[in-house]
């Protein structure tokens, strides 16, 4: 059942120039080049430094609450009637999503580099909350850029950030979503080069971010490997995760890339449908390669190279690009990328709440919307692991609105 | 013409002991015809070189003024082919004023480097600044531009140390653009005294004229910069004239050109 693929050279990606095949790279204004090169040097030294990783793992254990459980989703398994479905419970992490894994790593990088001010962009607000959290913990001022539309649809997270002492700056440019927040964060960085660390929230952007964020997120896949071996005595037949920028997915996928028997499936947001122009956020399935935010990758764009806004009900997937490593795995055929619409994600959200007693994030609900197909494809006796990347508390207003409920005037 | 048109312009000004006044406007802002009227009038208003922006949806190094200009242009329906057409029409009436296109990588990527370079040459543009294309990513584009004798103008910045400058100036032609402030366009003001040293350093490393931009808003500032640099670039201050006259579109060319004249005069009489 495995699709043929060219083995990704046991995975020494990216190369020294930050390339994953033809994707990735370093497309930034010259003012930022010395900073980005300095960050890369600091990162290459940190990744070889045992003390750095010891501190990272200690924080993950005692502050974040890792390892996150690998949970057998019995009723969902029964419901779909195929392979056993396991949830990797990233939603149980401190702050409610996988984002904190990366923020712990990056705040240690900022400290190591002597930076005194942190900026970040956020879509759903999960990365913003995680950034605000580590900045509170490490006593660093934090400014989070957030699209004005997202500020509106993620109110609980905006308040959480403020509570944690972070300044949230609403961005009204463009459509007021994640891409516009990222532009604004880059403008801040270019202006405050001497003291500022840019904490990018996903495995995208300029080198070394795609590699660095991946390394901070692979704790997900590494734990999963160990846990499934303990529980089932073998590797899963498939892993599945939702993909916006793609950090939770690459964190799950990367440790399995060399295991040819493990299918790797990413789920993009199809919004109103792939056939609706500018109505989805599926960069791989509905875009083509280009350059944005420091890297070459698949992008939603018009024929002239202007970036489209895209759409997804999930703020965290509402981004017109995708991490360069996913672009590479897609072209290579090692990972398969499918899609789920807003409607399908909402159904999966409701289903999981009722069957499992777990309210999943709308982002993760996209993966759940496709896990039934995958469980059937793998078949009875098989094992599928789904990365439950975040909890859905932040989404209840959006979902209530979509369901036509008023939530008592909230 | 390409690089030789740029070289000729700098040589002529040097012979007169003058710095160049470089005027930036966004192509198609607020619409193509108004934009052409502005372009057409710039040489007579004293612009020695024209930087013509090609709009991009996500201009990450621009301040609010030029962001809005790009939005206006795109909203008016400007396509990249229309920018080339503006250049072609300009060349029918002016063969001596260099035109440097300025924008971001993705529209260039989507056409492909070879096509981009040949379309630039056919239209009569002489060089291009691609803000998010550092030397590390520029080889393919530089090859294509060299093939048409066109210049890829590089940006040097306050964050460029000597080692970085050496990387920067390699394969640069025409002139080097010194970004005088760390920041986005049109927000911080350049300090003329503080730039003298860096400009000299960039000139020595590159062996090319140095144009200074990103923080020049007034004739006084432009004059001060022209004392130490080979060219002063003004963008946001001109684009603001467009924005201010939007309610009376017919007034836009006159307003912009009036402002350009004052800036040009300050630059040309600085030394």
Image: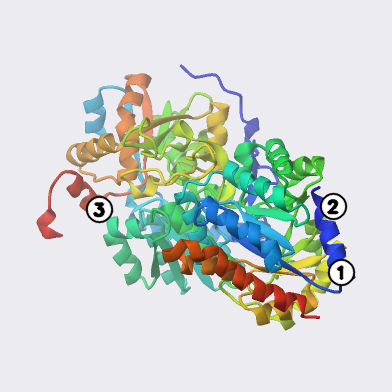
Q: Nearer the viewer, residue A11 or B209?
A: B209
Mark carried by residue A393 = 3
Residue A291 against residue A238 in the figure, above or below: below
Report in which chain the residue with disc 1 lies: B
**SS under mark 3:** helix
Find residue A294 and report its horizontal and vertical position in percent.
59, 51
Nearest to the eye among marks 3 and 1: give it: 1
Q: Is residue B34 left or right of residue A238?
A: right
Among numbered discs 2 and 1, the one appearing first in the sequence = 2
State the residue at coordinates (47%, 40%). Answer: A300
Which residue is labeled 2 in the image? B4
Q: CA distance from mark 3 to mark 2?
A: 63 Å
Report in which chain the residue with disc 2 lies: B
Find residue B44 and report its horizontal and vertical position in percent.
70, 65
Find residue B190 and report its horizontal and vertical position in percent.
66, 77
Mark carried by residue B14 = 1
**SS under mark 1:** helix
State the residue at coordinates (52%, 64%). Answer: B252
Corner quadrant of residue A33: bottom right
Query: Are marks 2 and 1 in one subunit?
Result: yes
């Amino acid at each position: 059942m495995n699709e043929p693929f060219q083995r990704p050279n046991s995975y020494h990606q990216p190369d020294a120039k930050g390339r994953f095949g033809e994707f990735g790279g370093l497309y930034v204004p010259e003012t930022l080049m010395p900073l980005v090169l300095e960050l890369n040097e600091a990162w290459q030294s940190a990744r070889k430094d045992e003390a750095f990783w010891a501190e990272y793992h200690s924080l993950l254990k005692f502050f974040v609450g890792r390892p996150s459980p690998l949970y057998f989703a019995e009723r969902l398994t029964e419901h779909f009637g195929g392979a056993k479905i396991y949830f990797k419970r990233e939603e149980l992490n401190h702050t409610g999503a996988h984002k904190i894994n990366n923020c712990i790593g990056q705040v240690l990088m900022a400290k190591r580099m002597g930076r005194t001010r942190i900026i970040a962009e956020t879509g759903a607000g999960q990365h913003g909350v995680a950034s605000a959290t580590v900045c509170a913990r490490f006593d660093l001022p934090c400014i989070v850029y957030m699209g004005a539309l997202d500020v509106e649809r993620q109110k609980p997270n905006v308040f959480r950030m403020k509570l944690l002492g972070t300044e949230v700056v609403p961005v009204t440019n463009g459509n007021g979503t994640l891409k516009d927040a990222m532009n604004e964060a880059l403008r801040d960085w270019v202006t405050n080069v001497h003291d500022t660390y840019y904490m990018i929230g996903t495995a995208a952007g300029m080198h070394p971010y795609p590699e660095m964020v991946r390394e901070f997120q692979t704790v997900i896949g590494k734990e999963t490997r160990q846990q499934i071996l303990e529980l089932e005595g073998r590797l899963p037949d498939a892993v599945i995760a939702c993909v916006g920028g793609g950090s939770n997915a690459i964190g799950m996928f990367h440790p399995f890339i060399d295991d040819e028997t493990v299918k790797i499936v990413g789920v993009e947001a199809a919004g109103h449908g792939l056939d609706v122009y500018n109505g989805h956020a599926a960069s791989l399935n509905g875009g083509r390669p280009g350059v944005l935010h420091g890297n070459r990758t698949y992008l939603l764009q018009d024929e002239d190279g202007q970036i489209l806004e895209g759409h997804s009900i999930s703020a965290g997937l509402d981004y017109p690009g995708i991490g360069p490593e996913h672009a590479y795995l897609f072209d290579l055929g090692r990972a398969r990328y499918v899609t789920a619409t807003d409607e399908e994600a909402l159904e999966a959200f409701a289903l999981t709440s009722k069957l499992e007693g777990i309210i999943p994030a709308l982002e993760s609900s996209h993966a759940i919307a496709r896990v039934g197909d995958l469980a059937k494809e793998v078949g009875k006796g098989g094992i599928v692991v789904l990365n439950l990347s975040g909890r859905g508390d932040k989404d209840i207003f959006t979902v209530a609105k979509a369901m036509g409920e008023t939530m008592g005037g909230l | 013409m390409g690089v030789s048109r740029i070289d000729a312009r700098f040589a002529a000004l040097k012979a007169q002991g003058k710095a160049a006044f470089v005027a930036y406007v966004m192509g198609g802002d607020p619409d193509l015809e108004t934009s052409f009227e502005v372009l057409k009038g710039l040489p007579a208003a004293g612009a020695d070189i024209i930087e013509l922006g090609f709009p991009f949806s996500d201009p990450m190094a621009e301040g609010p003024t030029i962001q809005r200009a790009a939005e206006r242009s795109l909203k008016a329906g400007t396509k990249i082919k229309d920018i080339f057409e503006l250049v072609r029409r300009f060349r029918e009436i002016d063969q001596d004023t260099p035109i440097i296109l300025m924008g971001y990588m993705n529209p260039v990527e989507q056409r492909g480097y070879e096509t981009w370079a040949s379309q630039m040459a056919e239209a009569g543009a002489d060089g291009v600044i691609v803000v998010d294309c550092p030397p590390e990513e520029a080889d393919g584009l530089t090859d294509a531009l060299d093939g048409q004798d066109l210049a890829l103008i590089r940006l040097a910045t306050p964050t460029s140390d000597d080692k970085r400058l050496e990387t920067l100036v390699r394969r640069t032609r025409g002139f080097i653009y010194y970004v005088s402030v760390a920041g986005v366009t049109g927000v911080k003001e350049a300090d003329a005294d503080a730039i003298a040293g860096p400009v000299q350093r960039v000139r020595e490393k590159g062996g090319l004229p140095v144009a200074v931009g990103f923080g020049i808003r007034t004739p006084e500032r432009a004059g001060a910069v022209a004392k130490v640099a080979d060219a002063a670039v003004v963008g946001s201050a001109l684009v603001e004239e467009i924005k201010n006259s939007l309610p009376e579109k017919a007034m836009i060319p006159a307003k912009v050109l009036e402002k350009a004249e004052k800036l040009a005069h300050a630059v040309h009489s600085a030394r």
